[in-house]
Image (cartoon, grey):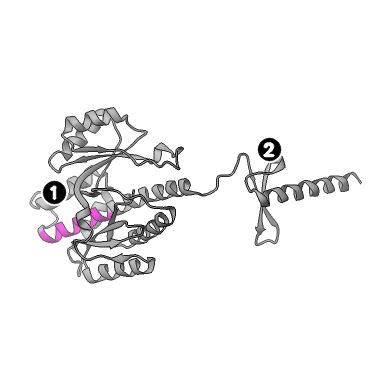
Amino acid sequence: MAFSSVRAFGAVIHRISLGFSSKCPSFSPLHSLNVLDWNFTSKGSSGRRIRRIWTSVPVYMGRRSSKIATRKGAQDARKAKRYGKIGKEIVSAVKKGGPNPISNTVLAVVLQKAKELDVPKEILERNIKRASEKGQEAFIEKFYEVYGFGGVSLVVEVLTDKINRSVAAVREVVKDCGGKMADPGSVMFKFRRARVVSIKVTDADKDQLLAVALDAGAEDVIEPPTFEDDPEEDPSDSFYKIVSSAETYSDLLSKLREEGIPFEPDNGFELLPLATIEVDDEAMDLNKDLMSKLLELDDVDAVYTDQK
């Protein structure tokens, strides 16, 4: 009898909790007492209902969490693309001047850049060997210009050994995502080419970076964008960008090392927008999807945008 009463009481609490949560997912009677927050989902493969228990209020995906997930994924993608581009540059250098960096000055420059980027040694050795394989051609640099959503422009950087393959792949992705290929020169004028070092805002003080940049002869320090609808954005996911010329880039890296400031170097250069465009959530999501799919292409090394 006592057991039946307990079951009946549990069933009542369950119904009350579900009734409230259907109207407001982040609230339940027990939640307000800080006792328990249950969320019942669809049945699993075993036929039993799946229950999840939170110890605090669940966070629902919105613009902020979407941006954070995008940035974290983008950081990993940038590193993979950086290594891939260095590999292709090594292949091209070896094809032109041989595998000995002493006699091949182009290869020596690429290997020095790889050292700055902390590229693993096995990647360097693998691509030097790859260059000697039969049928392997040198890589050619190309840029494809694209119109995104909300007035946003994109520049797709490609280093490819098959131009017809790369342009066909880029066109297909742009078409499938609803973007539009732009004529050469239609977008590129909105960007400038520069050497850039990225530093997490949590790793250095702004005044310290300004002093280092000034001492190294850098051109500018760009602060990360802020959003009025996102006052609690995690600063560990934001970066300062120190803009430098090719001549002062090495000095800048040396100064940062002397100050003990962690940094992410570029992969040879970056295209920086002369002005940025702020778009609504829908356009932001569409552009994110377009850029993500472009970066999945093996020939694509980077995608630059003037979206804020």
Asked which secondary structure carries label 1, the reply is: helix
Provide residue 169's location: percent of width, then percent of height: 30, 68
Tell me the residue that label 1 is attached to.
108
Provide residue 235's location: percent of width, then percent of height: 40, 37
Q: In the image, 162: left or right of 240?
A: left
Q: Report the magenta residues as a range.
A: 84-96
- Dot 2 amino acid type: Ser
Q: In the image, 150: left or right of 135?
A: right
Quarter location, residue 187: bottom left
Q: Is residue 197 above or below residue 146?
A: above
Tell me the residue that label 2 is attached to.
32
Q: How crowded is mark 2: few (under 14 residues within 10 Å), some or many (20 or more)?
A: few
Asked which secondary structure carries label 2, the reply is: helix
Q: How many marks?
A: 2
Of badges 1 and 2, the one in the foreground is 2
Q: Is residue 216 above or below residue 5?
A: above
Cα distance between the residues tagged 1 and 2: 65 Å
Q: Residue 54, which numbered label?
A: none
Name the residue nearer the viewer: 236 or 113.
Answer: 236
